[in-house]
Amino acid sequence: MADEFSAEVKQFIDQNIESLAQLEALLLLRRETPRGWNASEIAKALYVPHELAGTLLTDFCRRGFVKVSSRTDELYSYSVADCRVDKLISEVADAYQDRRVAVISLIYSKPLNKVQTFADAFRLRKEGLP
């Protein structure tokens, strides 16, 4: 199923997308360019908690996918400086539109965070002791 995508699309998802909410937020911001969104609006549009929306927007800024206005009400808008990255995000959007289940499967088939895996293994091991 993942073979349906280019290596670049797979790599982008692997390196930048950890959840469906994150992907949908990025694609919403891209689709609604140049509109600015605050965390409350993103939360409402995607039916996610406000805190998650804020975290996603902050992460997008760090990754260089959005810019934030300096107004009192922080508004985030899609803004990718590198045209190659913008083209890649466009390819991800097309893949998600055409093969939604395959993209979702690709997102959630990634290995778990190694630190979390280690912590879980320790916890399971400890629970098994008398």
Image: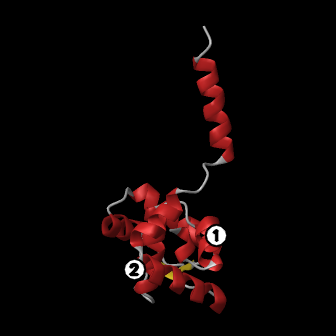
Name the image colouring.
secondary structure
Question: Where residue 95 appears, x then y in whole percent?
Answer: 47, 79
* x, y percent for residue 51: 44, 56
Q: Of residues 14 and 73, which is closer to you in this image?
A: 14
Q: At numbered mark 1, what does the secondary structure look like: helix, strand or loop?
A: helix
Which quadrant would residue 65 be assigned to in this image? bottom right
Q: Is residue 114 above or below residue 38?
A: above
- Left or right? Give the position of 121 relative to 33: right
Q: Residue at x 42, y 71 (%)?
A: 24
- The reply to whether residue 5 is visible in this rendering is yes
Where is mark 2, residue-wise?
A: 97
Residue 130 drawn above or below residue 85: above
Q: Which mark is residue 62?
A: 1
Q: Amino acid at mark 2?
A: Gln
* Distance from the alpha carbon under mark 2 to that under mark 1: 26 Å
The residue located at (58%, 89%) in the rendering is 87
Judging from the image, what secondary structure is the residue with disc 2 in?
helix
> In this picture, is 51 found above or below 46?
above
Residue type at mark 1?
Arg
User: How far across and down, in percent of the image, does residue 124 sit?
Assistant: 59, 25
Side of 62 where 93 appears, left or right: left
Q: At x 36% / y 64%, what residue is drawn?
A: 43
Of pointers 2 and 1, the one earlier in the residue sequence: 1
